[in-house]
Amino acid sequence: MKLNRALKRWPWLQKKDFAWKVRWRMRHDRNERFIMLQDKYLVKEFAASRGVRAAEVLYLTDQPSTTPFDRLPPRYFLKANHGSCWNILHLESGFYLFGNGARLFAGGASLPKDEASAACRLTREQCIRQCETWLGRKYSTKEWAYQHISPKIVVEEFLESADGPELRDYRCYTFDGVVKAMNVCSAPHRSRNENFFCDPDWKEFTLTKYKERRPATPMERPANLKELVATAEKLGKGLDFVRIDLYHTTRGVMLGEMTLYPERGGEDTPTACPVFNQWLGDQWVLNRNGSG
């Protein structure tokens, strides 16, 4: 019998690692709270209800042409609330298609390089059209919560890093309010295909296989590590699993976003190490009633 037929007949043959559980959630878990958590605007309200701050909203619209560009500060982001990596950065010199920042910060620069800037630069009119395109699209029909978000463009403040020139993404894998692992990176790190996985005490996980390179320069432990972990645990309480993405900014710890379907549960995620991926999956006790 072919393997795929065998797996359908005997699903227990599949390894129930972390990615398997993400895929299970995508197919079965219809927790209504997920819609709010995946909405990049409404999640700010959820965070505020638990005493956690997020970037300030400067403008919210479903009509991008009404955005008061001339009254906005020199630096800010425009983000579609119903998708992932649908981001535009405005710096003093203009608009840039940002995505996850890897292309714009090619080579690991702390500010966009000229050649990267040219490839990503948008006019104001192109920025408006790009936002209108996003508003007219559904993001990843396999990811249930995204399909129920009312599309908006969120204009939000530009956050300054307290850890140096690079704004780090502290991605906390949080299971029923307990952080078990952290993935730390930044736009320049992504541009160099670097990644770092550690436990809540900043002890690096040794992987049997690496998909991305370890950072060339060791990641320095943040002075407020305990605060970062405590913040993630406050936000993740009552959820079987959520990845809490935090920033350490000049205005304190801020929520970036809450991620329910990391990498859509693709094979060999979140790392290429099957031992780690299985261990991480073992931390997750699935909410099998699917209602939250």
Image (cartoon, rainbow, N blue to C red):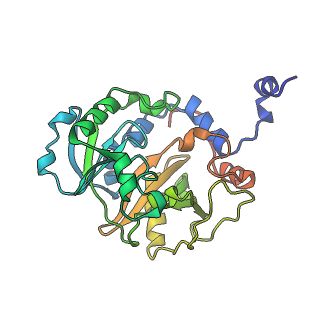
Residue 118: x %, y % from top left: 34, 50
Q: Quadrant of residue 267?
A: top right
Q: Is residue 168 left or right of residue 124?
A: right
Residue 10: x %, y % from top left: 80, 27
Q: In which quarter of the image is residue 146?
A: top left
Query: Can residue 230 be seen from the camera position used here?
Result: no
The quadrant of the rendering that contains the N terminus is top right
Residue nearest the viewer, comparing 109 with 42: 109
Residue 52: x %, y % from top left: 35, 58
| Residue 162 versus residue 67 in the image, above or below | below
Q: Is residue 80 left or right of residue 266?
A: left
The residue at 73%/56% (across/down) is 209
The residue at 42%/40% (across/down) is 38
Residue 3: x %, y % from top left: 82, 28
Residue nearest the viewer, comparing 18 with 104: 104
Residue ranking furthest to the left: 71
Q: Quadrant of residue 21?
A: top right
The residue at 40%/61% (across/down) is 247
Q: In this view, does 236 lie to the left or right of 209?
A: left
Residue nearest the viewer, comparing 1 with 280: 1
| Residue 37 versus residue 27 in the image, above or below | below
Number of callouts: 0
Query: Can residue 70 be seen from the camera position used here?
Result: yes
